[in-house]
Image (cartoon, rainbow, N blue to C red):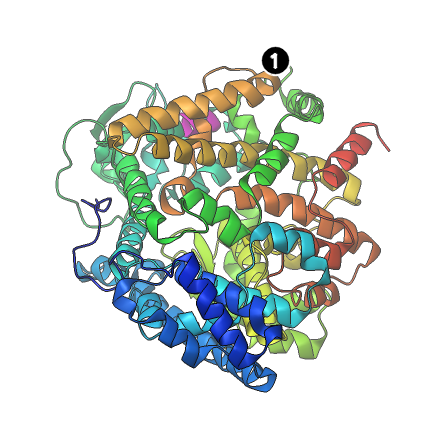
């Protein structure tokens, strides 16, 4: 756990001496001097550039006036050449550093066998920790700030529709230098992030050893589920299974034990003990039940519950991020940075979208539809808290999950088999054969140690990675479903890097957009498998499923924000106090939005999401992603060649979210298209 990361960096560390900007009188005099040299038409540009430089200049940087005299550029051709040089070199720096991070994390992220003790230490290294400070100390960053505009988010939103592509690229150039975070802080952020990620990646439950109050084993031998992803997906898959409700109650109780940190430490990733989660009793597993592929016996765990480890990691993430606050004048909190610099959307706007979904009157009506479906199989069935994960609002496949897993294992015994099938998959969604091959050649597939993820490339010549979990018997359906999701990310990542006009605009406005494209692919997973017509026959029918997923994850996004605001209000909190606050906030949000719909007050299940621990302030992107996905799907219903449209919209780049959506679909980001479609579905129209 991080220690002392709220303290200022040691005296004398590069980039930590007090700021020494020009005072107003000195700046005005310098503006007039430079305007006399470069022409009166440059006066506003000079004044703006000096203000931008002064905000981050330190006494140790030397003579600001002398720097400005040497490096202000008024000649348009030289300015164009300087911009081009920045774009070329920043692509190389970002690209090679991304590749270095990938290599350092390789054993942590990819299933290469048993981890060595040195692997987590290597994963903590941030190769770019000193880069930003080097760019400031070398004055490269100040050249950008002196000569190109740093545009605030409100101005981007207001004036963005009139920007040229070059203007957007210039805005992204200076945004790179909007903060000057010391290397020690950057390294600490990387270290605690790697530690939290490793903690989550190793948080598995052996379900054959989770038993009922009567000692029954409901899950097959060898089932090892990572929290939260596999636990949630296993719960979702049991709505039509034998003993499905009993299995779901067991999983929900496991989740609650994890959230409240009352889970016995001995049962985490340990198939040598049996656990009854209602009474919390732990007993040695009979030798004949221990799986042949069980990992080597671990050192004995301390008796009793896991000692707030989950919240120790969460707290370490906060403390590391907070240490960057004084060095980011335009966005002085981690929350502000996550929205204004990373999402390019205000927190208030994102919260309003979440609330609109959660408070919609359609929620109760969809819940009643779910209750009716559940009572088709059990007339006495009442809604349960875990029905936030109900997956039966869309037509179900002809095969159950075991049948689907048999199909995927046969097709994809290893990562190479899935990689070889990517061209066919892409042709199936409307890419031309040539385009499908082009994209597939630029996507690499690896077996994930964790649940799965997509790792982008940042330099043309390097390729993004698709990671999903692949067992000894091949890729099961859960792994396949994740792989199709990650493929959506990778397709966007290739197009928005290799085929965009300015690499400074590579990517999408925020993670919600790449999630949306990934969801579009994931919604077609069974169609791509050729098992059945997976999606509903119309967008209206699909709306119910999309809305319920969004309703569920929107509360987790609210929880993420609530907890981070609590942390800023209680920066000296202990891990145990944070754990209590998380549980209290989860129950509060549940009682406000979910209890009126599903019943069952004071439910903490929203806090099970591993992202909350490993990926700070990330979860809101899923809700945005679902809303954006629905808008894209609505657009695709009128422009049905998915490949062609993804090829077009993935080139729009990192402009503001609403403007991206206007260019992609003709309307800004909104919950209304989804809510209106839900109402039409409920009305039978």
Residues packed near mark 1 inside 10 Å, few (<14), some (14 to 19) or many (20 plus):
few
Position of residue 677 measured from the top left corner of the image (x, y, whole percent):
78, 37
Residue 640 located within the stretch drawn in magenta: no
Chief secondary structure of the magenta portion: helix
Please state if 184 lies on the left or on the right of 675 as rendered: left
Quarter of the image for residue 467 reads bottom left
Q: Residue at x 47, y 57 (%)?
A: 475
Range shown magenta = 247-253
Which sits in the foreground, 215 or 594? 594
Residue 592 in percent (x, y) is at: 55, 19
Q: Residue visible at 43% across and 25% down? A: 585
Q: Is residue 396 visible?
A: yes
Give the residue number, with chain letter if any, for mark 1.
Answer: 380
Name the element at disc 1. Answer: loop
Up/down of 314 relative to 519, above or below: above
* Quarter of the figure with residue 433: bottom right
Q: Position of residue 188 (x, y in %)?
A: 26, 54
């Amino acid at each position: 756990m991080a220690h002392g990361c709220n303290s200022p960096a040691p005296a004398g560390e590069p980039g930590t001496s007090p700021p020494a900007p020009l005072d107003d009188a000195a700046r005005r005099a310098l503006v007039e001097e430079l305007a006399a040299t470069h022409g009166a038409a440059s006066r506003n540009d000079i004044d703006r550039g000096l203000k931008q430089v002064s905000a981050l200049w330190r006494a140790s940087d030397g003579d600001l006036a002398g720097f400005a005299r040497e490096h202000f550029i008024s000649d348009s051709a030289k300015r164009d050449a300087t911009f081009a040089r920045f774009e070329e070199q920043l692509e190389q720096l970002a690209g090679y550093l991304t590749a270095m991070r990938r290599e350092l994390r390789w054993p942590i992220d990819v299933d290469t066998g048993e981890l060595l003790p040195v692997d987590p230490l290597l994963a903590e290294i941030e190769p770019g920790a000193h880069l930003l400070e080097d760019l400031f100390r070398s004055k490269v960053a100040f050249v950008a700030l002196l000569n190109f505009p740093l545009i605030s988010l409100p101005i981007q939103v207001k004036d963005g529709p009139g920007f040229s592509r070059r203007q957007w690229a210039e805005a992204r150039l200076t945004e790179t230098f909007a903060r000057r975070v010391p290397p020690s802080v950057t390294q600490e952020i990387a270290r605690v992030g790697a530690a939290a990620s490793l903690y989550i990646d190793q948080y598995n439950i052996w379900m054959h050893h989770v038993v009922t109050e009567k000692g029954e084993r409901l899950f097959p031998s060898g089932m090892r589920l990572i929290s939260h992803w596999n636990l949630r997906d296993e719960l979702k898959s049991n709505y039509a299974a034998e003993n499905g409700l009993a299995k779901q109650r067991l999983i929900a109780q496991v989740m609650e034990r994890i959230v409240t940190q009352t889970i016995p430490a001995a049962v985490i990733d340990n198939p040598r003990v049996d656990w009854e989660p209602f009474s919390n009793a732990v007993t040695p597993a009979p030798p004949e039940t221990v799986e042949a592929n069980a990992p080597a016996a671990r050192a004995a765990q301390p008796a009793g519950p896991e000692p707030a480890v989950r919240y120790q990691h969460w707290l370490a993430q906060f403390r590391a991020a907070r240490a960057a606050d004084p060095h980011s004048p335009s966005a002085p909190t981690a929350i502000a940075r996550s929205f204004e610099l990373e999402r390019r959307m205000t927190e208030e706007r994102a919260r309003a979208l979440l609330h609109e979904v959660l408070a919609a009157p359609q929620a109760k009506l969809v819940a009643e539809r779910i209750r009716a479906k559940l009572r088709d199989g059990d007339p006495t069935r009442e809604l349960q808290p875990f029905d936030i994960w109900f997956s039966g609002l869309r037509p179900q496949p002809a095969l159950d999950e075991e049948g689907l897993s048999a199909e995927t294992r046969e097709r994809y015994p290893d990562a190479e088999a899935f990689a070889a099938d990517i061209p066919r998959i892409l042709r199936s969604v409307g890419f031309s054969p040539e385009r499908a091959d082009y994209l597939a050649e630029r996507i690499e597939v690896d077996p994930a140690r964790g649940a799965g993820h997509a790792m982008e490339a940042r330099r043309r010549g390097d390729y993004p990675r698709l990671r999903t979990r692949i067992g000894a018997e091949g890729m099961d359906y859960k792994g396949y479903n994740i792989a199709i999701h990650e493929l959506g990310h990778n397709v966007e990542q290739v197009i928005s890097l290799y085929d965009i006009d300015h690499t400074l605009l590579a990517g999408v406005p925020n993670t919600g957009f790449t999630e949306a494209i990934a969801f579009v692919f994931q919604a077609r997973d069974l169609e791509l498998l050729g098992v059945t017509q997976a999606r509903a026959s119309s967008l209206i029918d699909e709306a119910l499923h999309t809305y319920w997923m969004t309703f569920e994850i929107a509360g987790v996004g609210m929880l993420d924000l609530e907890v981070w605001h609590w942390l800023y209000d209680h920066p000296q909190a202990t891990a145990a106090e944070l754990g209590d606050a998380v549980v209290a906030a989860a129950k509060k949000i549940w009682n406000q939005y979910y209890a009126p719909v599903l019943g069952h007050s004071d439910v903490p299940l929203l806090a099970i999401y591993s992202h909350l621990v490993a990926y700070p302030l990330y979860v809101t992107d899923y809700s945005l992603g679902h809303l954006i996905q629905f808008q894209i799907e609505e657009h695709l219903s009128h422009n049905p060649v998915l490949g062609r449209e993804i090829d077009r919209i993935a080139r729009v780049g990192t402009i503001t979210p609403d403007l991206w959506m206007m260019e992609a679909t003709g309307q800004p980001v909104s919950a209304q298209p989804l809510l209106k479609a839900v109402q039409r579905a409920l009305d039978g129209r």
